[in-house]
């Protein structure tokens, strides 16, 4: 993020920006699905349930029956800290409850039953929320009169159909998703003494509509070994808008900046992933590799002098997932997994050009237990991740100098997934 003559309006925009743009540096805070979530997201070579279209559109071709995923929700806590963010020796710490649905899908099988014992055609209608996050934090700076409040909410909804067909050992599929991404932020900052004071209030609102297309395949080499691969296009923008309001009051007077006509371009890059899974009796092992493409976007460059432009740079990164499943008595699946989420942003420097200043690498683990009957599958599990790295902070809250600082975030999510098979 640029200093741009250290305008007072940018003070608020930068302070809220580091926490409000995490999705433009990273990819996944938690894992989507039921079975997939328990296995750390290592699902590309399987993908045969309602969450399959998010990992591999070819996977649902191997679903044996029609099904309805009634819910897959997460309940958790986001814990974070930015060192010295509110002054030297005063860290910005937050702890916020997060509750939101993650996925709902219907999977319909149709066509004449083939040698596999199932219809070859599969149609899925899915809604996913793969990156929701909320922060609600308050703090004081020496006294109750000097206060800091930050509220930020963001989420992206994926919704759309998928079609897959099975040809003996091969499944091929395609998906089309409409994406609706929103970010909302509110910051209130007050600092002063008998001779000087500074008050900042800022609100930001961003909405992006876009589309993503995907293709995928799964091939069962034999009854034990399965491989899968998929490709998801970068998000193509339908429309995108931003609103910004900043009010800064100091001894010398006040400044107000308000714009409702700003633009926003999607920052989701292309994604390619490949996986391999091995099943032997009650045991399944799976590994995935995920590549996220490079991307640069620039919005409202002509307004850079006012600090109202938006510039995002994502470097190419490679992430991984690994997981296993062991089914007890053909009814109780036990699962565990591991995943990475490496930062796609540059390491922050004070005079950098790009707005996505967070650079945090995330490591996560998942565990779950399930219960299967003839027509239902229920999974209860835990998703834990830890991210650490750097972001930017002000080294002087009056003069607006920038320095890199340490930042961490720990996420605890309890997830519940239920599906009914016809």
Image (spheres, rainbow, N blue to C red):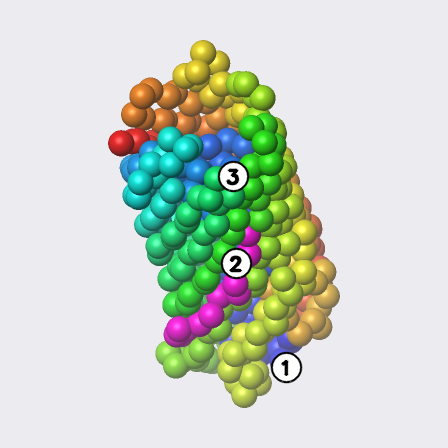
N-terminal of the pair, mark 3 or mark 1, is: 1
Residue 232 is tagged as 2
Q: Residues within 10 Å of mark 1 (few under 14, many from 20)?
A: few
Determine the residue located farthest toward the left in the rendered image. 422
Name the dominant secondary structure of the magenta segment: strand
Is residue 93 in view? Answer: no
Tell me if residue 329 comes above or below residue 47 in the rendering: above
How far is mark 3 from mark 2, CA to CA? Answer: 23 Å
* Residue under label 1: 5
Q: Residue at x 37, y 78 (%)?
A: 260
How far is mark 3 from mark 1, CA to CA? Answer: 62 Å
3 and 1 marks in contact (CB < 8 Å): no
Residue range highlighted in magenta: 230-241
* 23, 317: nearer the viewer: 317
Residue 199 is tagged as none
* Residue under label 3: 169
Q: Position of residue 232 (x, y in %)?
A: 52, 58
N-terminal of the pair, mark 2 or mark 1, is: 1
- Magenta run includes residue 233: yes
- Magenta run includes residue 272: no
């Amino acid at each position: 993020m640029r200093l741009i003559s250290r305008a007072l309006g940018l003070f608020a925009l930068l302070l809220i920006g580091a926490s409000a743009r995490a999705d433009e540096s990273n990819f996944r805070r938690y894992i989507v699905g039921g079975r997939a979530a328990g296995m750390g997201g290592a699902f590309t070579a399987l993908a045969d349930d309602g969450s399959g279209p998010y990992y591999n559109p070819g996977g649902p071709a191997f679903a044996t029956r029609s099904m309805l995923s009634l819910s897959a929700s997460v309940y958790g806590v986001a814990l974070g800290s930015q060192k010295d963010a509110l002054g030297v020796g005063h860290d910005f710490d937050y702890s916020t409850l997060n509750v939101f649905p993650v996925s709902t899908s219907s999977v319909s099988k149709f066509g004449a039953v083939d040698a596999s014992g199932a219809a070859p055609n599969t149609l899925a209608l899915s809604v996913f929320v793969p990156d929701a996050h909320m922060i609600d934090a308050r703090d004081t700076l020496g006294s109750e009169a000097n206060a800091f409040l930050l509220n930020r909410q963001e989420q992206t909804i994926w919704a759309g159909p998928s079609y897959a067909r099975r040809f003996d050992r091969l499944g091929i599929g395609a998906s089309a998703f409409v994406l609706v991404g929103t970010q909302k932020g509110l910051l209130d900052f007050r600092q002063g003494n008998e001779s000087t004071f500074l008050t900042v209030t800022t609100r930001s609102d961003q909405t992006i509509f876009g589309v993503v297309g995907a293709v995928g395949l799964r091939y069962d080499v034999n009854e034990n070994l399965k491989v899968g691969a998929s490709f998801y296009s970068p998000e193509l923008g339908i429309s995108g808008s931003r609103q910004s309001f900043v009010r800064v009051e100091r001894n010398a007077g006040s400044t107000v900046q308000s714009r409702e006509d700003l633009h926003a371009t999607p920052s989701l890059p292309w994604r390619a992933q490949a996986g391999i899974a091995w099943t032997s009796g009650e045991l399944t092992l799976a590994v995935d590799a995920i590549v996220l493409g490079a991307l640069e976007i620039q919005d409202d460059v002509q307004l850079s002098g006012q600090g109202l432009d938006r510039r995002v740079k994502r470097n190419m990164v490679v992430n991984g997932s690994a997981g296993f499943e062991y089914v007890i008595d053909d009814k109780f699946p036990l699962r565990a997994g591991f995943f990475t989420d490496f930062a796609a942003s540059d390491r922050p420097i004070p005079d950098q050009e790009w707005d996505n200043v967070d650079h945090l690498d995330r490591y996560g683990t998942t565990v779950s237990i399930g219960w299967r009957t003839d027509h239902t599958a229920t999974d209860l599990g835990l998703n834990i991740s830890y991210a650490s790295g750097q972001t930017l902070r002000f080294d002087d809250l009056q003069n607006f100098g920038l320095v890199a600082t340490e930042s961490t975030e720990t996420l605890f999510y309890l997830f519940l997934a239920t599906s009914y098979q016809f």
